[in-house]
Image (tube, rainbow, N blue to C red):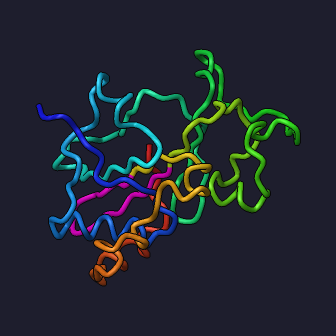
């Protein structure tokens, strides 16, 4: 099969950012992902700035897999947020949070607590996070009998430095009109837990 590409390169900050991408896919301006990435493709495409939009039925993807080790999810607005861990949890061991240690939180990345929360939700110092690891943000939107998923990978430092941008900053996307029933679908579905 053809090499897989992300749907878009950037960062989804707001729910509107994700709905812009979904609207662009529904209009045929961007492509839904037809499948999950193969093992051999992962290192190339699972990186900061990669955003994948897929529809459950058409893709056959029930659970998105990327081969990385993630913390448990935390809710941040309409998104679920995960942080990459330095090592998998030992078999049979629950994903328990570590005792709080104010000196451990991202030793290389000094961030204001509010800023940290904006990028990582409540996942600030509770697990053994991978140094310079990825953050994953997911959103699920049931729409007209189909379930659409948006999966965004990023590094907070790249967003802060302006290396990756949001759809609402993109000249090709920012003026798209999001269909009203798509907005309603997202509002009706306050939070669907994503894998």
144 magenta-colored: yes
Q: Which image quadrant: the N terminus?
A: top left
Q: Which residue is at the far left?
A: 1
Q: Which residue is at the far right?
A: 102
Magenta span: chief secondary structure: strand
Q: How many marks?
A: 0
Q: Position of residue 70 (x, y in %)?
A: 55, 34
Nearest the eye: 127 or 10 = 10
21 magenta-colored: no
Nearest the eye: 166 or 104 = 166
11 above or below 90?
below
172 above or below 159?
below
At x 30% / y 84%, what residue is drawn?
A: 180
90 above or below 157?
above
Q: Magenta residues, as a range?
A: 137-150
56 above or below 14?
above
Q: Which image quadrant: the C terminus?
A: top left
Q: Position of residue 15 (x, y in %)?
A: 46, 69
At x 71% / y 60%, what residue is drawn?
A: 115
Nearest the eye: 101 or 110 = 110
Q: Position of residue 27 (x, y in %)?
A: 17, 70
Q: Which residue is at the far top?
A: 91
At x 70% / y 29%, what residue is drawn?
A: 128
Q: Is residue 184 left or right of residue 88?
A: left
Q: Is residue 27 left or right of residue 188?
A: left
Q: Position of residue 148 (x, y in %)?
A: 30, 57
Quadrant of residue 41 in the image? top left
């Amino acid at each position: 099969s053809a090499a897989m590409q992300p749907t878009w390169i950037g960062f989804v900050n707001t729910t509107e950012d994700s709905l812009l991408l979904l609207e662009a896919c529904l209009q045929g301006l961007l492509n839904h992902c037809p499948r999950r990435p193969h093992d051999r493709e992962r290192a190339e495409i699972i990186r900061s700035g990669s955003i994948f939009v897929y529809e459950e039925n058409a893709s056959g993807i029930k659970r998105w897999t990327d081969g990385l080790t993630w913390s448990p999810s935390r809710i941040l607005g309409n998104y679920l947020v995960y942080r990459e861990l330095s090592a998998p949890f030992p078999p049979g061991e629950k994903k328990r949070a570590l005792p709080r240690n104010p000196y451990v939180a991202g030793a290389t990345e000094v961030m204001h607590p509010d800023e940290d929360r904006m990028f990582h939700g409540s996942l600030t110092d509770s697990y053994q996070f991978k140094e310079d690891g990825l953050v994953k943000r997911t959103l699920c939107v049931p729409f007209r009998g189909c379930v659409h998923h948006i999966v965004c990978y990023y590094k907070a430092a790249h967003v802060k430095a302006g290396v990756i941008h949001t759809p609402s900053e993109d000249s090709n996307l920012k003026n798209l009109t999001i269909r009203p029933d798509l907005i309603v679908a997202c509002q009706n579905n306050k939070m669907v837990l994503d894998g």
